[in-house]
Image (tube, rainbow, N blue to C red):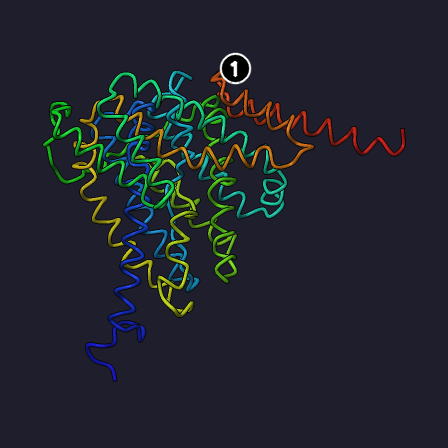
Amino acid sequence: MSNASEAIDGVSVKGWFSLTSSALTAVVVGFASTILLIMEAADAAGANDAEKASFAAALCFGMAVTSVILGWRYRMPIITAWSTPGAALIATSAGAGLDYPSAIGAFIAAGVLMCVTALFKPVARLIEKIPASIAAAMLAGVLLRYTMGVPGAAIELPYLVMPLIVVFFVLRVWLPLFAVPVVVVLGVVLATFTGAFGAGCCTLSMTQPVWTTPSFNWPVIVGLGLPLYLVTMASQNLPGFAVLKASGYQPPVTGSLWVTGLGSIVFAPFGSHQLNLAAITASIVTGSESHPDPAKRWLVVWPYAVFYILIGLAAASFVAILGSLPKPLIVAIAGLALFAPLLGSTTAMFREKNEIEAALATFLVSASGITIYGVGAPFWGLVVGLVIYGARYYQSMRKPHG
């Protein structure tokens, strides 16, 4: 019977409730976990307050649009996210000849590279052939520089940061999925009750998108755009495809790269640094908890999009409130949010015994923060690691004939 008990596409009210609950959980976990890191990235890129709000809003709107397109087109629960490792990369790129228009140019270049990957399958295969240990080492090097800020923040503001660290690791044992969102909320609550908020924390307003004309600076494109593309491909898209496969879906690789690549290009002038397939949050919406029928789970993209549109409209308010937190508190929360990705990356970089040397070299160079010819450390870390890996591989191929 089709009445109050049935809704769109024959999904019951109970079914829509579970879809909406899954979407809301994915949005809360995804947004609250790394919004402060996004703000740090925008700040490092040289964005002002209005541009920071536009940065966050563009990502939210981009995720809503691309998720609906992919979910509706392929009838799969494909949701997109912002590139968290990409944001960490940007946040550690300040001082490398980076200004906001140049950063926007690098974001567009990364989106173009994603489209090139979709257009030329050999390029996708080439990226897939980058040893996982070296890709993980490059990411770990980027994340290490950021997470190392947590101890310093704890010394500077112990009464705010130490409780967050304790709660974070307790929740990591019992409720790991909610560790970061709870820490974000707790950080805001503690800042409120201790009077640690800065001026302007109550300045609430609707988000106004801000257009920035990109500047294409070759050293910034090579030093930021290329690593941004690589780290997003290796740390977000490939795991995103894996999550879909693990849930019984055959991911549309080419279509997904086209949509996220074009979406990144379109929303980049408003601040979006990179859109990609969701990985961790995707696991929330692709399982039976979302809907018992795998063929109906794609409908989760609708509430997911609605929630992110609402957050995007209120992004200016979020930026105003969270931006008024003390700097050490922001550093601590963002660093804790990157603890799990750093743990995963460092574990992966040492997984293959014969690749440890190349991975360690990649990690050290990527974490060093060096800049050569205006090109940042992650790119050089990747180059060094691949050279060592190639030399070792060549030597191993010659051994039977030597």
Q: Is residue 402 visible?
A: yes
Please determine whether, in this image, residue 82 is positioned above or below residue 369.
below
**The N terminus, quarter of image:** bottom left
Query: Of residues 196 and 309, which is closer to you in this image?
Result: 196
Query: Of residues 50 and 38, which is closer to you in this image?
Result: 38
x and y percent of residue 15 in the render? 29, 69
Residue type at mark 1 is: Ile
x and y percent of residue 212 in the render? 29, 31
Please determine whether, in this image, residue 82 is positioned above or below residue 330.
below
Q: Is residue 270 visible?
A: no
Label 1: element kind: strand
Q: Which residue is mark 1?
A: 372
x and y percent of residue 211 in the render? 27, 34
**The C terminus, quarter of image:** top right
Residue at horizontal 34 percent and vertical 26 percent from the top: 101
Which of the 4 image quadrants contains residue 57?
top left
Numbered marks: total: 1
x and y percent of residue 145 in the render? 43, 22
Label 1 crowding class (10 Å Cα cut-off): few <14, some 14-19, many 20+? few
Residue lying farthest to the right in this orientation: 401
Residue at horizontal 30 percent and vertical 21 percent from the top: 154
Please determine whether, in this image, residue 305 is positioned above or below residue 134.
below
Residue at horizontal 19 percent and vertical 33 percent from the top: 188
Which of the 4 image quadrants contains residue 178?
top left
